[in-house]
Structures are given as structure tokens and as C-alpha cells.
Image (cartoon, rainbow, N blue to C red):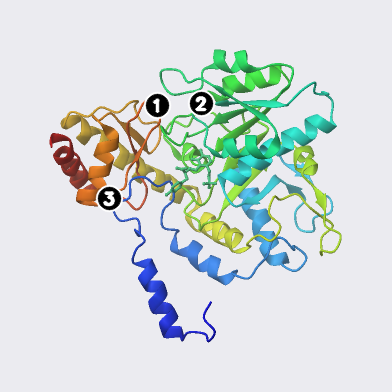
Amino acid sequence: MNVQGLSEREIFSYLENAKSEDTDYYRVLSSMCTHPHKIAAEAHRLFIEANLGDLGLFAGACKLEQEVVRMLGELLHAPLIDVPSADSYEYSVCGYLTTGGTESNIQAVRGMKNLITTGKKGLKGTPNIVIPESAHFSFDKVADMMGIQVRRASLDSEFKVDLASVESHIDANTIGLVGIAGNTEFGQVDPIDKLSEIALENELFLHVDAAFGGFVIPFLEKPQPFDFKVPGVTSIAIDPHKMGLSTIPSGVLLFRSPSVLESLKVSTPYLTTKSQFTLTGTRTGASAAATCAVMKYLGHEGYRKNVQYCMQLTTKLVAEARKVGFEPLLEPVMNVVALKVPNPDLVREQLLERFGWHVSITRTPRALRLVLMPHNTPEEIIIFLQDLKKVTAA
Ligand code: 0PR
């Protein structure tokens, strides 16, 4: 750190310099995040100092968090629970705002572990969970942090989790299953209703990672079952900072039953509140304000239009790609396309070096992974395909 502080002008010139190295989402086809909606950005600024880690001091921000949880609970058909002590809320949905899908996934599994190890089952060895091969790498962190064995079930030919493989991994030490509603690489949705049957039969928790798909699936023309309407689903991760158009960091974790949230509680003797069930202590109220504001501003119809726009881009990209001879690995279910191209790693490198396109790659099989977000345009897609053709022809 320098001894004397710099001037405001110097600071901002320094910051602008750094900012000029950021992409501003120009030619970005690899991101599940996008520009936050301007309403979200303004609301974020308004609550910049609010700390949800000390709810007693920030009652207003706390109400906004509860309202986000209530609205998302309603969207995802969460059951209402009785909260006699809450002043203006007779009924509530159970959950809280996280920093994103990673924290939500960690906490969902921690909840399973806490309830099982203190509860009925009496484990004989290391607890395990069964997740799809396609699960996000946040579950590797779960395995590392919590001493839980993470078993990966294989995928079927449509990149959904294979149910027979899930069943073959379940044993006496299995505490829960995970299904993905909108997997990171293919945008595919696992058969959550079938996973629910397996979970109920074996008395297991079922966590649905809808970090990306949660703000997509409900607004598709033909939504697939993935939320609390499916009886065995016990928790859901959904990220407003992805297709919810809120600011980073905004994730939400919802539970069907308050007992799981209860199991996450630790006491906080010297705070204005007695206990905390969140993973982080100090956490921003700005995200609650941003998410609440953008959800109320857009409403169901606003999000439907957003998804419709991204799906139109997706359809256009696939149609144009087919014209030049590139097939998708699967018919896109949401706004993620895995495109079969020769030598994808080299193509990716060339697209960036020669034309400034940011794309990513699926692991198995290796294909070009493209996420069509609100920052992309139909014109951009035409140019992208021209550039892709040049790169693959070389
Ligand atoms: N679950 C799923 C299904 C996800 O796709 C992701 C992130 C997570 C959980 C974890 O969410 P957080 O990163 O919010 O904790 N998926 C994106 C990915 O890994 C995250 C991302 C977003 C990466 C924007 C890059 C980027 O520019 O691809």
C-alpha cells in the first residue's frame, strides 16, 4: 500500500484502466452470468452497507430477503410453513440468500449430513451422496470439505442421469441424491420425477441444483417437472445472479422442511440475533435488494420474455450452424448449445485469438459449449458462425 493516499482522479483512472481489460460481455458465449438489470444495480447500490449477517441492525434488508425467498418459493411451489413469531408474515417459505450455486449446494449437503448423523439412520461408515456425472464442480468442494463420499452416476445418451446407475450406487450409507435442472455443460434436465421416486423409496434427501435452470425452466413453453411439486424434492438451489438478472453474489437455497434449515443453525451469542444458519457470517443485503427489485420489476411476464429471447437466439444458432454442417450434440433444452466441431480445443483457441470470441468446451465428449444469454444478439450469432466457418476451414 502507498503511504499517502491517491487522489480520486488517480483512483478512477486506475480503475478504468483495469475495467478496460474486462470483456463487458462483448462476444461472450461462455458465461452463465450477464449484465445485471439496471433496476437490480440501482437497488444494490442503495443497500450497499446492509449486512444480513446481523439481521437485528438491518431489518429492512432482512424483509427484502424474506420477500425474495417467498417469491421464489411461490415460483417453485414450495410448501408454506407457519411462522408465528414473524410480525408481518403469517406463513413463510423456508430458505435464505446465498452467494450462489456453490454455497447452496454445500449447504444442502451439509443439511443432509447433519440431519442424518444426528437423526434416525445411524450410519455405519462414511456417508455418501449420489450425483450425476454432469454435476457442477462445486460438489467436488462438498466432498473435500465435509468428508462425504461423492458417487457419480453415469449419463444416458441424452446427457441425463442414468437411473439404473443412480440405483446401483445407493447403499446403507447413502444419505441423499442430487439431480440437475439445467446442467452446466449441456443445459439438460435430469428426470427429477424419477429421481424423486427413488429418493422416496430409499428414504433419501433429493437436492435439485437449478442454479441455472431455475430462472429458465418455469418460463419455457413446455416446462419439465423439477421443483417442489415433485414430492421427493427436499431442497433447491436457484441463482438470481445467472438468468435472474440480479447482481453478483445472489443465490437462493430453499428447503421443503424447516428441520433441514434448523440443522444448519449455530448460536451467535453476541449478535442481535441468537443464531445463524448461513455458511458465511457477514453477507450482503445489497443482493437481497437487487434480487427483490428486479423480480418485482420484471414479474413472471418479464422473465418469460427474457427466456423467450434467449431461446430464440438458441434456435437461430442451431439452425445457422446446421446450414454450415455443424450438428448439436443434443436438441437444446434451454439456452445452452453443445456443438460438434472438429478439434474443439483448437477451434476455441482460434475463435478467441482471431476474432475475440469467448466460448467453452464440454468435458465428455469434447464439443463447443455456447451459452446464449441476454447480452447476445441475433446479428452477433450470424457473425459468430461466419467466424466459426473460417476457423474450421483453415
Ligand atoms: N450449479 C450449476 C448447475 C452451475 O452451472 C453453477 C455455475 C453452479 C452450480 C455454481 O454456481 P456459482 O458459480 O454461482 O457458485 N455455473 C457456471 C459455470 O461454472 C458459473 C459461471 C458463470 C462460470 C459465469 C463462468 C461465468 O463467466 O460455468
Amino acid residing under circle 3: Thr
Amino acid residing under circle 1: Thr
For label 2, the residue is 133
Classify mark 1: residues with Cα within 10 Å, few (<14), some (14-19) or many (20+): few
Residue 113: % across, % down: 74, 33
Callout 2 secondary element: loop
On the question of residue 316 being in view, the answer is no
Nearest to viewer (mark 2 / mark 3):
2
Q: Assess whether mark 3 and mark 2 are in contact (beta carbons under 8 angstroms).
A: no
The tag earlier along the polypeptide, 1 or 3, is: 1
Q: Which quarter of the figure has residue 195? A: top right
For label 3, the residue is 377
Residue at the (41%, 57%) spot, across then down: 35
Report how far apart the C-alphas of labels 2 and 3 lie in the structure: 32 Å
Front residue of 285 and 93 = 285
| Residue 299 placement, left or right of 47 | left
The tag earlier along the polypeptide, 2 or 3, is: 2
Q: Assess whether mark 2 and mark 1 are in contact (beta carbons under 8 angstroms).
A: yes
For label 1, the residue is 364
